[in-house]
Image (cartoon, helix red, strand yellow):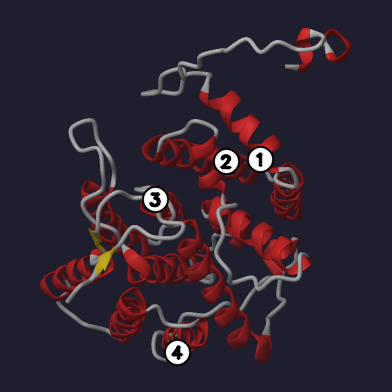
Amino acid sequence: MNLLDFPKGRKDHAHPTPITGGLAMLAGVLVVSLSTFAHIDAGLIAFLSASAVLVVVGLLDDRLDLPWTVRIPAQVVAALIMVYVGGVRIEQLGPVFGLDGISLGWLSVPFTVFATLGLINAINMVDGADGLAGSLVLTALALLSAAAIYSGNMVVASRAMILGGTVLAFLMFNLRFPWRPKAKLFMGNAGSAFLGFVIAWFAFRLTQNPGHPVNPVFALWCVAIPVMDTLVLMIRRVRNKRSPFIADRNHIHHLMLEGGFGPTQAAIALSLFTALCVLVVGQAMRLDVPHPVLLGAFVLMCLGWYWLTGRRQRAVRLFHCVYTMRLPGTRRPQVELVPVPVPRRHATNNKDY
């Protein structure tokens, strides 16, 4: 079917690579669901139906390069299936701001659709290096599962772990290893849309359950990297009078690769950073730190990233400094210094080099 990702344009992989990862993950979930659950409820039907819409449209996008005017309506349809068939929606935002009893009312459906589209496209935008999107989603699912167990919501925990196992299986073919220097399989747009929807589904199920309450701020920190990167890039593109949907090489993984990280190292580093942030946020919640403070911390991180990436070289230099701290599995780059004669009147001191 020619479902291959060919090296061209911004794509720097060396060989045509299958992009059936999204289809494979959905097939895995379908097989496990039908063979494990004795009762197929409306929620499962809604999840599988919405996922099928996203994967089919994603495969067509991978094959035909569909415009965003086709992709976005498909994502809206998937979100509406989640709301009206699955009964999953965002109804309460009060806990985010330290308030109780504030319902979104008629804004619940449009806000849920908007948030779902945001998460789908955030995962799509961060899917630019082998293993990165899958690792971040696996980390988020593990953290959401842990929060679900802590809050007593075992249904969400068990189903999130099934999806985590699916993503882990995909990563076995998508990550680079010493014995396999390139990915054997990409998730494609079908996979990134599917995983973005997965995060939306479980985040909403977890944070909108009055019987097992988990604050939405916690879920936000579970996907802090893709959300922050997407927000900052889209704001900068709009300010530069460009379409927010035009692709470029200014994502966080591009800057990390320029700073010396390999794809696998970048995926591990960002996943560990996410886990560390969530552990700190979770401990802060246990110590009754006001939730608006934790939301403000996320906003400050976004503002800091916006400032740091205002000059590309500044961000690359930071990642190079982090890289040379010798993360596990890394080596200091061997740089050959070549002396260049400088006229005396232009001579500078050493700290300027």
Q: Are marks 2 and 4 in contact (CB under 8 Å)?
A: no
What residue is shown with label 1? Answer: 287
Label 2 amino acid?
Answer: Cys
Residue nearer the viewer, 272 or 71: 71
Upstream in sequence: badge 1 or badge 2: 2
Verify CB contact (< 8 Å) between mark 1 and mark 2: no
Residue at disc 1, secondary structure: loop
What residue sits 64% from the left and 30% below the top? 317
Residue that sits furthest to the right in the current view: 345
Tell me, for residue 325, which label it has, or none.
Answer: none
Query: Regarding mark 2 in the picture, which secondary structure is present there?
Result: helix
The Cα atoms of the two marked residues, 1 and 2, are separated by 15 Å
Apparent side of residue 117 relative to residue 108 in the rendered image (left or right): left
Residue 339, relative to residue 134: is it above or below?
Answer: above
In this view, the mark in front (3 or 1): 3
Q: Position of residue 222 (x, y in %)?
A: 52, 52
Closer to viewer: mark 1 or mark 2:
2
Label located before the other in sequence (4 or 3): 3
Q: Rounded to the nearest whole Å, what is the CA distance between mark 2 and mark 3? A: 31 Å
Residue name at image x 52 percent, y 43 percent: 274
Locate residue 268, reporting x and y percent.
41, 37
Mark 1 is on which residue type? Leu
Return the x and y of residue 162 as percentages of the image width and height: 26, 60
Pointer 2: what residue?
277
- Residue annotated with mark 3: 12
- Return the disc, 2 or 4, that comes first in the chain's sequence: 4
Quarter of the image containing the N terminus?
A: bottom left
First in sequence, mark 2 or 3: give its number. 3
